[in-house]
Amino acid sequence: VQLQASGGGLVQAGGSLRLSCAASGRTFSRYNMGWFRQAPGKEREFVAAITWTGGSTYYADSVKGRFAISRDNAKNTVYLQMNSLKPEDTAVYYCAADPTPSGRLTDQGSYDYWGPGTLVTVSS
């Protein structure tokens, strides 16, 4: 499967952005999907994930209550709605796909497919 994230950009603190990740392939609906981010000089970290059914979601503590992950299997797309953005949210955001139904969704190692990332910059 190929993934392409979009929707990044420059936003002021307190603002909102919605990231989209479009997937190719007919089996998107069977993949767990996740969002990760990598800030300058830091390691890539987990942000949010959603199971293939859409029935369960998971969030990093740093974004809980501000970010929301969702998916539209008919459109082969997963979304990350980001509200109340902070300068510390500045990073390249990556979407990833995990074909294992029982994968650990917060673990980068569970994901087999990665998109090229989209840059989010939050100004203070």
Image (spheres, rainbow, N blue to C red):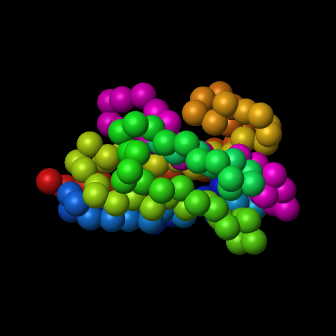
Residue 71 colored in magenta in the image: no
Viewer-nearest residue: 12 or 68: 68
Q: Residue furthest left?
A: 124
Q: Report which quarter residue 72 is drawn in.
A: bottom right
The picture places residue 56, in percent across and down from the top left corner, at: 64, 48
- At 48% from the left edge and 56% from the top edge, which residue is drawn? 68
Say above or below: 53 vs 58. Answer: below
Q: Report which quarter residue 22 is drawn in.
A: bottom right
The span shown in magenta is 25-46
Q: Is 31 positioned to the left or the right of 13 in the image?
A: right
The picture places residue 27, in percent across and down from the top left corner, at: 84, 56
Say above or below: 59 vs 23. Answer: above
The picture places residue 42, in percent across and down from the top left corner, at: 36, 29
- At 46% from the left edge and 33% from the top edge, which residue is drawn? 44
Q: Residue furthest right?
A: 26
Viewer-nearest residue: 42 or 57: 57
- At 38% from the left edge and 45% from the top edge, which residue is drawn? 63
Residue 119 appears in the figure = no
Q: Is 8 positioned to the left or the right of 72 in the image?
A: left
Q: Is 69 positioned to the left or the right of 83 in the image?
A: right
Q: Report which quarter residue 73 is drawn in.
A: bottom right
Figure label count:
0
Residue 7 appears in the figure = yes
- At 26% from the left edge and 64% from the top edge, which residue is drawn? 15
The picture places residue 77, in percent across and down from the top left corner, at: 65, 64
Residue 41 colored in magenta in the image: yes
